[in-house]
Image (cartoon, helix red, strand yellow):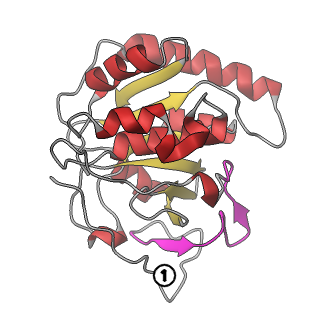
C-alpha cells in the first residue's frame, strides 16, 4: 500500500462517553478529552507528517512515529525533525518497515540507544509504558480518517487506560485521536500480531512514580526476552 492520502480530521458530532466501548473516534486539538488528559501529552510541535520514500514512494509511518516520540524523549538529533539524520536516511531508502529492517537501521544510526521492539496480540506494555510517561509507537489497523478500511499503519500511542486510548497519527499531525480502549486493542492487531516500539530514554512524566517504573522495566524485560525471536515479515507501508 502506498502512502495513504491525508484526509481532514473528522470530529464526531455526538461525543461518546468514556464508558462507550464500541467503534468511535473523536479528534481534539489538545491532548485531553472529557476531563482525561493524555498520560504522554506530546506537544504539536513534535508532530511530523508522514511522507513517502524518495526511492519507491512507500510510506515512512514507522520512522515518522519513532521521530515524533524520539523528539519528545530527547533522542539525540531527533528534535531536528525532518532535518535530522534519521529522516534523511529514511527518505533515501526504500519505504515500509518491519522489525528486522528497523533493528538494522537503528544499529547503524543509533547503536548506543536502548529500545524495545515487541510483537504480540496484547497491549499490556503500551498501557504500562504510557502510564510511566513513555510514548509508544505501535500498529493501528483502521481509523475514521481512513473510512474504517483496513490499513497497515504505525502511530504514536500517548494514552491507554481501562476506558480510553489516544494516538497521534503521523498522517494527521497536530491532532489527538481518542477512541475506546477496547477498540484500540482491536486496532493494534495487524494480521496475526501487533508490533510496538519504545525508546527507553527520558520519560517525560510530570509526576514520577519509582514503583511503577521498576515494575514496568521488569515486565518489559521479561516480555522482550520471551518474544525476541518473533519477527513479522509484513512491511508497514501506510
Whether residue 135 sits left or right of residue 61 in the image: it is right
Foreground: 93 or 170? 93
Q: Which residue is mark 1?
A: 11
Q: Residue at x 51, y 13 (%)?
A: 222
Q: Position of residue 14 (x, y in %)?
A: 51, 88
Q: Residue furthest bottom?
A: 13
Q: Secondary structure at mark 1?
A: loop
Whether residue 27 sits left or right of residue 97 in the image: it is right
Rendered position, 179 above or below 111: below
Q: Position of residue 114 (x, y in %)?
A: 55, 17
Q: Position of residue 116 (x, y in %)?
A: 48, 22
Whether residue 100 sits left or right of residue 45 in the image: it is left
Foreground: 227 or 114? 114
Q: Magenta residues?
A: 23-41
Can residue 140 be seen in the rendering of this structure? yes
Q: Residue at x 17, y 54 (%)?
A: 2
Q: Residue at x 54, y 55 (%)?
A: 47
Q: Position of residue 197 (x, y in %)?
A: 45, 31
Foreground: 118 or 109? 109
Q: How many numbered markers are drawn? A: 1
Q: Is residue 27 magenta?
A: yes
Q: What is the magenta segment's predominant secondary structure?
A: loop
How crowded is the residue under tag 1: few (<14 C-alpha within 10 Å), some, or many (20+)?
some
Rendered position, 48 above or below 230: below
Whether residue 108 sits left or right of residue 92 in the image: it is right
Q: Is residue 142 magenta?
A: no
Q: Residue furthest right?
A: 207
Q: Quadrant of residue 63?
A: top left
Q: Quadrant of residue 193?
A: top left
Can residue 127 be seen in the rendering of this structure? no
Amino acid at each position: 500500500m502506498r502512502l495513504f492520502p491525508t484526509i481532514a480530521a473528522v470530529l464526531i458530532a455526538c461525543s461518546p462517553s468514556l464508558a462507550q466501548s464500541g467503534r468511535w473516534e473523536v479528534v481534539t486539538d489538545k491532548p485531553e478529552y472529557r476531563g482525561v488528559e493524555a498520560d504522554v501529552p506530546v506537544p504539536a510541535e513534535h508532530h511530523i507528517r508522514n511522507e513517502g520514500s524518495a526511492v519507491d514512494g512507500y510510506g515512512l509511518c514507522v520512522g515518522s512515529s519513532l521521530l515524533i516520540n524520539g523528539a519528545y524523549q530527547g533522542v539525540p538529533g531527533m528534535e531536528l525533525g525532518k532535518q535530522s539524520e534519521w529522516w534523511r536516511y529514511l527518505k533515501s531508502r526504500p519505504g515500509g518497515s518491519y522489525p528486522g529492517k528497523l533493528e538494522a537501521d537503528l544499529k547503524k544510526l543509533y547503536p548506543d540507544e536502548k529500545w524495545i521492539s515487541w510483537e504480540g496480540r496484547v497491549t499490556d506494555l503500551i498501557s504500562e509504558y504510557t502510564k510511566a510517561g513513555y510514548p509508544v509507537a505501535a500498529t493501528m489497523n483502521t481509523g475514521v480518517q481512513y473510512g474504517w478500511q483496513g490499513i497497515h499503519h504505525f502511530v504514536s500511542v500517548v494514552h491507554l487506560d481501562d476506558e480510553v486510548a489516544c494516538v497521534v497519527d503521523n498522517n494527521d499531525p497536530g491532532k489527538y485521536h481518542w477512541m475506546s480502549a477496547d477498540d484500540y486493542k482491536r486496532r493494534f492487531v495487524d494480521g496475526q500480531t501487533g508490533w510496538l516500539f519504545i525508546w527507553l530514554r527520558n520519560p517525560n512524566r510530570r509526576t514520577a512514580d519509582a514503583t511503577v517504573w521498576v515494575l514496568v522495566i521488569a515486565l518489559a524485560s521479561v516480555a522482550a526476552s520471551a518474544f525476541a525471536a518473533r519477527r513479522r515479515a509484513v512491511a508497514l507501508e501506510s
